[in-house]
Amino acid sequence: MGFASLEYKVDFLKDTCGSCEQEAIEKIMSVSEKDVVAPYEPPNLATGIKKYLMEYKRERPDTEKLQMQVDRFMEAFDVRAKEEKGNLEVKEVDEDGFELVKRKSRKMRGSVAPKITEIKQKKRKEPVVNFYRDQKRLQQAKKLALLRQKFEEDRQRIAEMRQNRKFKPY
């Protein structure tokens, strides 16, 4: 460290820190250089092909481990399904001793399935228009003819307004 002795180090600390206690200074000075931990250095990060190989291995777990996870999940799912089925079959009795009738089928709430069936039903109801190319061409030709007719009517109307001097474009 560059200092000659422990006493010199303690004297130096006392001079620089006036309110420090003797015991605290000696405790600080008794720490050996081997006990001092170097600052944190991040591990060597892989680069190049090693990096991509590590990512590949991390993203794709071992097939045996994956199979174990899937099996555990399916077992838990089966247990939950049996419990829910058992809950549906339990007959409830009200205060008067009558059985409450419940619907046995479960409605899928918040699921995508009902929405999909609604969309399919809507699609079926809509008739197919212009299935053939000729029909599409004829429809486009009719639209064009209608636009031309409106354009000619507007042109005639503008000509009449000019003759009557009622047309003031500005």
Image (spheres, rainbow, N blue to C red):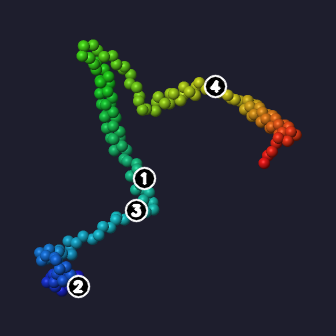
| Residue occupying image coordinates x 31% and y 31% | 80
| Residue occupying image coordinates x 78% and y 33% | 146
Q: CA distance from mark 1 to mark 3?
A: 13 Å
Q: CA distance from mark 2 to mark 1?
A: 51 Å
Q: CA distance from mark 1 to mark 4?
A: 50 Å
* Front residue (pair 76, 23): 23
Compare marks 3 and 2 and give the one earlier in the sequence.
2
Residue bearing mark 2:
2
Residue 46, disc = 3
Badge 3 marks a residue whose secondary structure is loop
| Residue occupying image coordinates x 86% and y 39% | 164
Compared with 158, 118 (above or below) is above
Mark 1, Cα crowd under 10 Å, few <14 / some 14-19 / many 20+, is few
Q: CA distance from mark 4 to mark 3?
A: 60 Å
| Residue farthest toward the bottom in the current orientation of the protein | 4
Compare marks 2 and 1 and give the one earlier in the sequence.
2
Compare marks 2 and 4 and give the one earlier in the sequence.
2
Three-letter code for the amino acid on which mark 4 is drawn: Pro
Badge 4 marks a residue whose secondary structure is loop
Image-based side of 116 in relation to 68, left or right: right
Tag nearer the camera, 3 or 2: 2
Three-letter code for the amino acid on which mark 2 is drawn: Gly
Badge 1 marks a residue whose secondary structure is helix
Three-letter code for the amino acid on which mark 1 is drawn: Tyr
Position of the N terminus by quadrant: bottom left
Residue 56, disc = 1
Residue bearing mark 4:
127
Q: CA distance from mark 2 to mark 4?
A: 95 Å
